[in-house]
Image: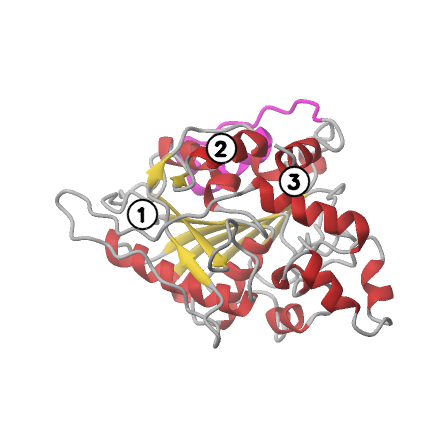
Amino acid sequence: MAQLGPVAHCETGQNGSRTARALRRVAPAGVMAVAAAVIGAPPIVAPQAQALPNGDSIMMVPTVPGPPQTEHLGAATYLKQHPDAAPQGANDFGCKPTAQHPYPVVLAHGTDSSAYSDWSGLSPQLAQAGLCVFAMNYGGKPGKDSYGTEDVWDSSAQVGTFVDQVLAATGAPKVDMVGFSQGASVTRYYIDKLGGAPKVDQWIGLASPSYGGVMYGLVPVADKVPGIYKLVQAASSLAAVQQAAGSPFMNDLNSGGDTVAGVRYTTIGSRVDEMIQPFGNIALKGAGATNLVLQDLCSADLTGHFHMVYDPFVQQTVVNLLAPDRAVAPNCVPVALGTGISDVVLAAHS
């Protein structure tokens, strides 16, 4: 397989700041913490944050199913009127894995986003394939309407809390995990650094910032300008800054190797990712890693970072990996360069 480069969901500079603000509007999910009470099953208490020392980071579990969406703008529009929406097919804590599909799937969204915003397209497909699906909103700041903005170490611990809740509810011995952008980093940190490996069978990273990004060359410049990262953080988020190439978190994540034994790792990335440059930073180098490049599988599909979770070819590839008994060949059709960017801009001004 061709090697992929990691995808960094880091927003910096003038254009990056506008993108970060737009992304916040793409996923306005101020979701209330809810306990999933299912007939025939004990109530499952929604995980609370593994909080920062100052209590600035929260995790919520949305439980009211929303309709499937085909792009971020539709999800953003729906969330404005239904802020507690969960992706259809997700967070049924009464779901029991089958012999064919023994591992529930945990989905982790990207920076300045939410479960519904990123997974309203894929989650229904996974549920229809016979999988138990779960998705949390992690890394939120109290009073804000988006998630994945706070300390990424803290968010990684929140992932572990949620995994334990899912395993307790389903009785499964392990989960499979799918992370988009920052979601790929915090799930992998949980697996590699927080003892999660025995609880995970398969990890899939979409547009994974495995080694961070230089953000169109801005990071090397920022490294030489005192105080610039504080300005970047103010314009975007703490989590965005923490995912830059060479940051303490990225160095910590990959120290001692980027995979651990016993887990199957797959990255799916794009040569034209708008946020992660160089795109080669997406690829994992360790044993047990498979790195897929979208354009090597479908050269006409020029999906980049923002459209990755809504790209039908990518969605079917993920379904095939998680439910091989339901595998069908993805339909390779042309996708224009820049698809999904206008959705972000329109959502920001809707």
Viewer can see residue 275:
no
Q: Are marks 3 and 1 in contact (CB under 8 Å)?
A: no
Q: Is residue 157 above or below residue 69?
A: below
Q: Residue at x 51, y 68 (%)?
A: 192
Q: Is residue 291 magenta?
A: no
Magenta segment, which residues?
A: 311-335
Q: Is residue 170 left or right of residue 218?
A: left
Q: CA distance from mark 3 to mark 2?
A: 13 Å
Q: Residue at x 33, y 44 (%)?
A: 91
Residue 321 image point, x, y percent: 49, 41
For label 2, the SS is loop
Q: Position of residue 4 (x, y in %)?
A: 70, 50
Residue at the disc numbered 3: 306
Mark 2 vs mark 1, foreground winner is 2
Q: Which mark is residue 102?
A: 1
Locate residue 318 relative to residue 347 in the image: left or right.
left
Decide: few, some or many residues near mark 1? Use Cα within 10 Å; few <14, some 14-19, many ≥20: some
Q: Give the mark nearer the N terminus: 2 vs 1.
A: 1
The residue positioned 30% from the left and 51% from the top of the image is 34
In the displayed structure, does residue 101 sit left or right of residue 17? left
Q: Does the residue at mark 3 contact the one at mark 2 (Cβ under 8 Å)?
A: no
The answer to if 334 sits in the magenta stretch is yes
